[in-house]
Image (cartoon, grey):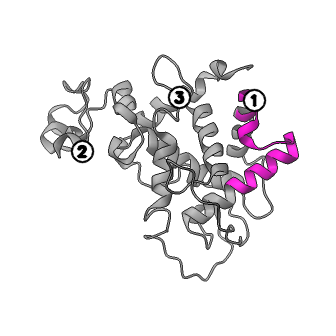
Amino acid sequence: MSDSDNIPTARRSFLKQVAGAGSVLSLQAGAAALVVQKPALAQSAPPSADPLPGYIFFSSDEAAFVETMVNIMCPADEFTPNGVDCGLALFMDRQLAGDFGRGAKRYMRGPWQQGKPQHGYQLPLTPEQYFRAGVEGANLECRKRHGKTFDRLRPDEADAFLSELASGKANDARIALGSWFNELVYPLFAQACFADPIYGGNRNKLFWKMIGYPGLPATNMVNMLQYRGKPFPGARDPKSISDFS
């Protein structure tokens, strides 16, 4: 792979695999598709710089990391623009800036002990702290391997590095980066693709249109029964929450 137009088709096929695995509505913030061994107790990431203009949460370094990542995982093609133009980075920023990022529904009182893989998330960090520690760790690993941060890698280098993160082959002293990517970052990316556009991602309902998902009408019980296993007649013009506001 020599440029961003030659990203493996597996990146694109992921979108339809996620949609086909079950209802899009089942993608809840923090849900993990993959679970790996948890690291030992990690320290909270230091306070970040002021957010980059246009974002609420991301610092400039974090924005550069996420924008590079979503453009590699969702390259521009005949189906959609690149990940940034689809609003994927914006969705992640808003989620981490809100109650989800602050760990509003997580038990955060300990005691914090080494967990087993099946126990899921076990760190004494909120998602926003976990995210920031992971970005810092991933960039440190990039510097060790390539002499530069993730956002400065060539597209083929960045794609390979993401694969190494997902497979647990890249690690940081404080954070198990495979767990970080699979349990926090990847689920946020999937949610950004298929969530209602009012949350920042899935801009112009592009991903709903791509998979034939009608949006909010799919939650109506009558429609669920009438069109189960059948094409929905309004799928070409899906409706979001804002269309009924």
| Residue 238: quarter of image | top left
- Could you tell me what secondary structure mostly forms the magenta stretch? helix
* Amino acid type of the residue tagged 2 in the rendering: Ile
Distance CA(mark 1)–CA(mark 3)? 16 Å
Q: Magenta stretch containing residue 179, yes or no?
A: no
Q: Label 2, secondary structure: give it.
A: helix
Give the image location of residue 37, x and y in percent: 69, 60
Q: Label 3, secondary structure: give it.
A: loop
Q: Residues within 10 Å of mark 1 (few under 14, many from 20)?
A: some
Q: Is residue 112 above or below residue 165?
A: below
Distance CA(mark 3)–CA(mark 2)? 24 Å
Residue at image location 71% in from the left, 70% down from the top? 42
Q: Name the residue tied to disc 1.
A: 154
Give the image location of residue 219, x and y in percent: 22, 44
| Residue 155: quarter of image | top right
Residue at image location 24% in from the left, 45% down from the top? 241
Task: Give the magenta range.
Answer: 135-158
Q: Name the residue tied to disc 2.
A: 241
Q: Is residue 235 toward the left or the right of residue 158 in the image?
A: left
In the rendering, which numbered label is found on residue 33?
Answer: none
Q: Quadrant of the N terminus?
A: top right
| Residue 153: quarter of image | top right
Q: Name the residue tied to disc 3.
A: 82
Is residue 146 something one can see in this rendering? yes
* Amino acid type of the residue tagged 1 in the rendering: Arg
Which badge, 3 or 2, comes first in the chain's sequence? 3
